Image (spheres, coloured by chain):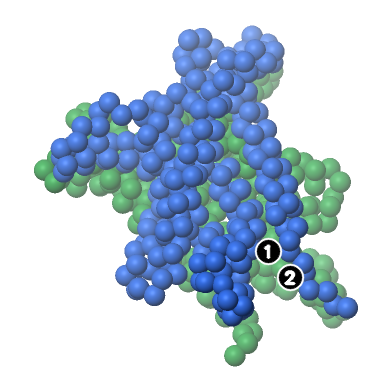
């Protein structure tokens, strides 16, 4: 078996892979930013009094939950240029594949975030808003200073999970020819004529695993920091 | 919408549908394998059984920390190597590279789902209060009877929504079966599209098929949850 599997190859593969980790993280961060903005809109639609807005937002979330990432990725990759060209006459042939990756995962993250934001918002007692308004804050100030900071802490763990899941789904970006860390790994394997496949994949798994653990730790720390202002009611 | 080949769209829809049995078979078998393992590892986490508990923690951390596609790559490369070693040792003459990808799919997806189910069952079992098992003991039930008749029926109701999510994620994950050339929905439709580059239509079909399956599965789970919880007392 020594012939097929060489443990030291894992170490030598890491320097070739790690520079591409930044591309993976960069794509995930961009998707999280765009997705969060869209998620706010969706959450607002879900909480609005307009029935059609609510139905639309709920339907969007259901569809996103039911679509495998790889299918969504290819739908965006083939669909967006086709629609842009045939309906608006815009040529998107030269757009970088990274753009499609970001669009896909933003769409997906937005659906996830809308649920997280909605549940965090609903977890805040209505009395908080009323109390804020009654001491003379405008509704906007009440949201910014009272509701948002509290909802933010509640949403933080789920936000962290969402971030990790975008990072992992992002591993599929190689299927449309995007060269992130997985794409680079496949290039290395192709250059080796298919040898040392397992070592490269183990290196990838280790990188992703460590990254997920680090992100989890960061979010746990953030939660601790932001929870400082919260004072539970004491029995005494 | 002249750029969509409607005839191809309708024809390929049935090709995609013909992959549904394989996708569902993989889902059901993986769940059947994962449920007992997940349940016993969940129990070993709750009772903090020394070795099993730390093993379960590590296992969950790995599965949650790495993308499914990487898990597929790693396992798909590891299993033949292990089998090769075993077969050589015991001098079994069996063509390893002709094993049906279905077997790999069962192993890979049950490996993934078990980790998810450990956490699902653990949180569900923890919703049942300790008093329930004490009460069961005090009326003369053995621990096994108490679990079977008192604890599990209650925990199952709490586990239902998460089980539904896990099942849907599993169905979505089978779309990655292309990596092990599993003849399921995505691969079948994609192969059909290879002749005329009708990828957009093919992915639209795949998208619709997954949407239909997921809505059906969600509906089934909701119905079963209602049935399970009919004995639950409700506050009026």
Q: Secondary structure at mark 2?
A: loop
In x, y percent, where is residue B106? 54, 41
The location of residue A82, given as percent across then percent down, is 21, 38
Respond whether the residues carrying marks 2 and 1 are from the same subunit.
Answer: yes
Where is residue B213 drawn, in percent x and y?
38, 55
Contact, CB < 8 Å: mark 2 with mark 1? yes
Looking at the image, which residue is at 62% across and 54% down? A156
Measured Cα–Cα span from mark 2 to mark 1: 7 Å
The chain coloured blue is A
From the image, tell me which residue sits under label 1: B124
Q: For mark 1, does the 10 Å Cα neighbourhood hold few (<14), some (14 to 19), or many (20 or more) residues?
A: many
Could you say which is closer to the camera, residue B3 or residue A113?
A113
Residue B62 - label = none
x then y, percent, for residue B187: 36, 36
Residue A162 lies, with reference to residue A19, above or below; the image says: below
| Vertical arrangement, residue B187 with respect to residue A55, above or below | above
User: Which quadrant of the structure image shows residue A73?
Assistant: top left
Q: Is residue A24 left or right of residue B3?
A: right
Position of A64 relative to A47 (above/below): above
């Amino acid at each position: 078996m020594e012939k097929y599997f060489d443990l030291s190859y894992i170490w030598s593969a890491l320097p070739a892979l790690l520079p591409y980790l930044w591309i993976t993280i960069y794509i995930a961060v961009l998707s999280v930013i765009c997705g969060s903005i869209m998620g706010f809109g969706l959450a607002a639609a879900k909480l609005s009094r307009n029935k059609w807005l609510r139905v639309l937002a709920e339907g969007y979330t259901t569809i996103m939950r039911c679509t495998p990432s790889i299918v969504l990725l290819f739908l965006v990759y083939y669909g967006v240029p086709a629609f842009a060209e045939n309906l608006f006459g815009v040529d998107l042939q030269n757009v970088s594949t990274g753009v499609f990756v970001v669009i896909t995962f933003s769409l997906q993250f937005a659906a996830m975030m809308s649920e997280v934001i909605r549940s965090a918002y609903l977890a805040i007692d209505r009395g908080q808003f009323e109390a804020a308004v009654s001491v003379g804050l405008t509704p906007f100030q009440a949201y910014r200073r009272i509701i948002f900071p509290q909802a933010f802490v509640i949403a933080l763990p789920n936000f962290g999970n969402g971030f990790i899941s975008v990072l992992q789904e992002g591993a599929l970006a190689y299927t449309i020819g995007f060269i992130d860390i997985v794409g680079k790994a496949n290039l290395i394997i192709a250059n080796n004529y298919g040898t040392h496949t397992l070592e490269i994949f183990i290196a990838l798994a280790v990188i992703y695993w460590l990254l997920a653990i680090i992100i989890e730790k960061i979010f746990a720390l953030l939660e601790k920091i932001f929870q400082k202002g919260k004072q539970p009611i004491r029995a005494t | 919408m002249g750029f969509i080949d409607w005839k191809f769209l309708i024809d390929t829809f049935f090709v995609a549908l013909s992959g549904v049995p394989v996708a569902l078979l993989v889902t059901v078998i993986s769940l059947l394998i994962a449920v007992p393992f997940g349940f016993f590892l969940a129990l070993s986490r709750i009772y903090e059984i020394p070795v099993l508990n730390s093993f379960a923690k590590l296992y969950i951390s790995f599965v949650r920390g790495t993308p499914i596609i990487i898990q597929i790559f790693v396992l798909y490369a590891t299993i033949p190597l292990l089998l090769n070693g075993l077969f050589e040792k015991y001098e079994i003459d069996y063509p390893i590279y002709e094993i049906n990808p279905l077997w790999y799919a069962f192993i890979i997806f049950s490996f993934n789902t078990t980790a998810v189910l450990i956490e699902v069952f653990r949180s569900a079992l923890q919703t049942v209060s300790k008093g329930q098992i004490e009460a069961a003991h005090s009326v003369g039930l053995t621990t096994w009877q108490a679990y079977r008749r008192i604890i599990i029926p209650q925990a199952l109701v709490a586990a239902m929504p998460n089980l539904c999510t896990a099942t849907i994620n599993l169905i979505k994950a089978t779309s990655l079966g292309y990596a092990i050339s599993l003849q399921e929905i995505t691969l079948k439709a994609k192969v059909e599209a290879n002749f005329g580059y009708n990828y957009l239509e093919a992915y639209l079909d795949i998208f619709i098929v997954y949407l239909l399956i997921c809505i059906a599965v969600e509906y089934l789970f909701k119905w079963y949850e209602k049935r399970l919880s009919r004995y639950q007392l409700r506050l009026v």
